[in-house]
Image: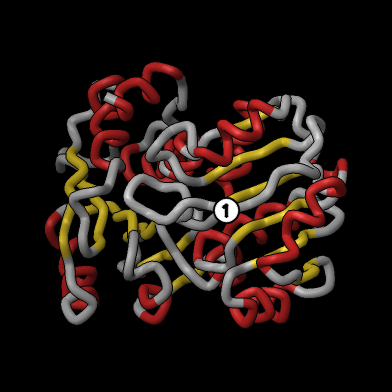
Amino acid sequence: MTNDKIPLAGVIGQPITQSKSPVVHAHWLRRYGIRGHYIPMDVSSVDLPHVLNNLPRMGFRGVNITIPHKESVLDIADVISDRAALIGAANTLTFQSDGKLHADNTDGLGFIANLKQEAPGWNPQAGPALVLGAGGASRAVVAALLHERVPEIILTNRTRARADALKAHFGGKIKVVDWTQAASHLDETATLVNTTALGMTGKEELKLNLGRLTSDTLVTDIVYNPLTTPLLAQAEARGCQTVDGLGMLLHQAVPGFERWFGRAPEVDAELRNAVLR
């Protein structure tokens, strides 16, 4: 580090008790012997500008941002990365030495890094991706898939207007289909992604008939509670390679940790086990 101050970082949201980010960063801080701290902070939308303005004076290098502030924080930031601007949301803030607040979005990076680590043979250009959902997470996933040159994204959402809005934002490689018609496109799908909360513990079930799903399709779910969602279990039973959502959470944390604490951390089985415990 460039000075003797103990580096601080954290995560801001409301609520914040469900966040696994403190476990991730605490593991890395211990592993690399860094004298730093990562703190969860429950902050309202009204208080967010005031809090972000004062954190650098308290020794904070930056913070992660989670629900419900990912979009509104762009109105507060001084510098916005191309990724965050494209997605329309930020999850990683860095307080720069010149006093400016830099906003970035690493969710898509985490999504792709997880696929490449857990399914090293995955070829994004092998065929269309079917993406379920059109919320904030979907925006990051769609942007990342387009960056990886997926030839087409078939996008569906229970409220079609939200999917249409994403198509208008991202352009011609997006094809929107009705939620009830999504299953009919499975036989042409090379990558199937669930970006909704359906199938998460305590949420509604994801009802998707997998009858036309082929074993060549890679299936991934950004949900990680449960780790093996019903979608992943059904896809495995049909012979598909599957990737759970925990790795996306772990990989999206890497850039922030490196910027705030000066060390590029490793995502490995030891970290996964620490978070799962």
**Residue 117 percent location from the top left of the image:** 61, 27
Residue 238 occupies quadrant: top right
Q: Quadrant of the N terminus?
A: top left
Residue 195 occupies quadrant: bottom right
Q: Quadrant of the C terminus?
A: top left
User: In the figure, is residue 173 to the left or right of 112?
Assistant: right
Identify the residue under disc 1. 207
**Residue 72 percent location from the top left of the image:** 37, 77
| Mark 1 neighbour density, 10 Å: few (under 14) some (14–19) many (20 or more) | few
User: In the figure, is residue 227 to the left or right of 129?
Assistant: left
**Residue 98 percent location from the top left of the image:** 34, 65
- Nearer the observer, 261 or 270: 270
User: In the figure, is residue 64 to the left or right of 189?
Assistant: left
Residue found 45% across the figure and 36% down from its top: 246
User: In the figure, is residue 68 to the left or right of 42?
Assistant: right
Type of amino acid at the residue the image marks with label 1: Lys
Residue 198 higher or lower than 68, as above or below: above
- Nearer the observer, 22 or 231: 231
